[in-house]
Image: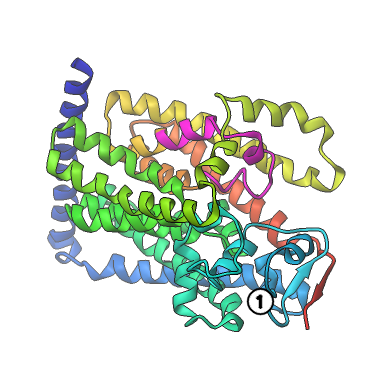
Amino acid sequence: MRYVERIVTLQQQERQEEQEEWTGARDVAASPAHGGINRSGPWRTLLLVALLTGLIYGAVVAITISHYSDNVSALIVAGEQFVERYPGSPGHHTVVYRHDSYDGLGYYYIAGNPFMRDPYIHDALRYQRIGYPFLVWAVSLGQRAWQPGVMIGVNIAAVMAVALLAGALIMWYAPGASVWWALACAVNPALIIGVRDDLIEPLLTALALAGLLLYLRGRVGWAALVFAAALLTREVGILFLAPLLVAELTARRWPRFVVLALSVVPYLIWQQIVTRAIGYSSTDTVEHNFQPLLVGMRLVVAGLPYVPAWERMYVPGIVAAMVIVVAALAVAAWQAWRRYDIVLGGIIVHCIAALFGGWVIWQGYRSAPRVFGGLYPLLIFAYLLYRRRNPGFAPVVGLILLLTIFVFVTQVVVAPTQAYYVTP
């Protein structure tokens, strides 16, 4: 009971202090030296940040497809072994890799058949994450030939939205901080890999940040709808939602708690539909992604001396991702003990989930810096608000920036060309 009272008291203090900081920021902006309130200035800057974000990810796409005769289907990462096993054709003029394949192929096939009409791929986990492929299907008007390009377009639009939403959250959560930090929120390891390989992280991050912003602005109903979409995009959206549910529960705001909790219902309904159609639940696959505390990390660390030569250049990225998780948990937990808020709660929940991440997540150079990538913008928000009170956030954010550069260089700029062929 004392713990609950402490959380509620800290939340009340947090809201009061944030209001004071926000009021102070507005007073400064309205002073004669600043020529009155200028709301358009930060938004103009933020539009430039979003445009620059789009240009950076346009470069990611251009560099990647340049190895494959500028064929945009190269980002699907369609592996020969899966193309031969999956029902139907991968489409005309599609890049097929001889020795590599990744999750984007599953989303590409589902975008071509989101309603599970025979024949369809029997992959409950990919169908459970219906948000991204369904949006691709809708935007492409169901035209298979358009979908490789639409997958890229949706993701670039999503990362630009992440930049805008991150900037709005910075102005709301950490008044006075530069909105140029939104660029670091939008250009991070998870989103670089997500755009490069036609994955769902860009859309998930945009939806999660939109839900968080709506919640902070008191639009709980709209926030619940957006979080429902986020959960249908990827189940780790719950890591953004959980701290909000805890905040409402501890503050005993029951109607708001119920509205937010209802955002899980569409996910559960769709899970039942997928389970009946395919014959097993996506939960069966998700469970393999998690192991007891720290087991996944320990197994990967123990296996580092035996990493194949071609994969050794990616090892620093895997190790850096582990260090970020452990350090972020320590710094955020210490700060939360002094002053709790939902951003710190989100960091802690992401880190705890990551510590239970299985070997299958941490051993992959594409998955280790990506799966719990929602952590990156949350850490930047916390750094901007608490940097004067808690110096521990600075080195963690610095490591994120270094990891971002490392992933861009190793997985985009100097990524080797894979053996491939193009379908007729």
Residue at disc 1, secondary structure:
helix
Up/down of 63 relative to 248, above or below: below
Up/down of 296 relative to 261, above or below: above
Q: Quadrant of residue 368?
A: top right
Camera-side residue of 405 and 192: 192
> Left of 212 or right of it: where is 288?
right
Residue type at the position of mark 1: Val
Residue ID at (19%, 62%) = 34
Residue holding disc 1: 72
> Left of 389 or right of it: where is 249?
left
Residue 132 in the image: x percent, y percent?
A: 48, 64
Residue 19 in the image: x percent, y percent?
A: 15, 44
Magenta-drawn segment:
349-372
Can residue 355 be found in the magenta stretch?
Answer: yes
Q: If the image is split into quadrants, where does the C terminus sit?
A: bottom right
Badge 1 local density, few (<14 within 10 Å), some, or many (20+)?
many
Up/down of 262 relative to 307, above or below: below
Residue ID at (26%, 53%) = 224
> Left of 302 or right of it: where is 27?
left
> Left of 419 or right of it: where is 144?
left
Residue 144 in the image: x percent, y percent?
A: 59, 80
Q: Is residue 348 visible?
A: yes
